[in-house]
Amino acid sequence: MKKVTASIVGKKINLDFEGFAGDSCSDEENAFRIFLEKMGVKTNVKHSDNKQEKETEYIPGKEESRS
């Protein structure tokens, strides 16, 4: 499931995109910024990070041990 979490702290907007494949989160970020501009909000991107989700392999019958 795709999920976008937005938080505003001290005049800074933080967006966290989860569940997006490849660079599709960049398209959503750009659409969000265009929406804000249309509402009169100027944005200046300080940092954008495309975090790769950790891939896990499921092996039937094998449980992960948690310490």
Image (cartoon, rainbow, N blue to C red):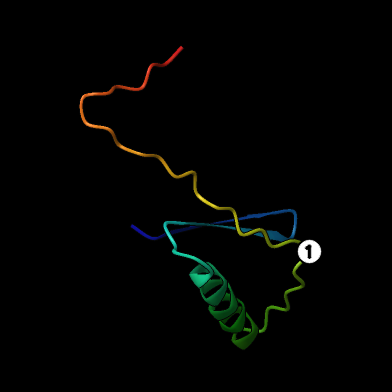
Q: Position of residue 30 (x, y in %)?
A: 59, 78
What residue lies at 38% left-to-right and 16% top-to-bottom? 65
What residue lies at 50% left-to-right and 49% top-to-bottom? 53
Amino acid tagged 1? Lys
Q: Position of residue 34 (x, y in %)?
A: 60, 83
**Residue bearing mark 1:** 46
Element under disc 1: loop
Q: Give the camera-side residue of 51 and 36.
A: 51
Q: Position of residue 1 (x, y in %)?
A: 33, 57
Q: Give the camera-side residue of 59 and 47.
A: 59
What residue lies at 59% left-to-right and 53% top-to-bottom? 51
What residue lies at 78% left-to-right and 64% top-to-bottom? 46
Where 25 sits versus 67, above or below?
Answer: below
Q: Is residue 29 left or right of residue 57?
A: right
Q: Position of residue 42 (x, y in %)?
A: 73, 78
> Residue furthest toward the left?
61
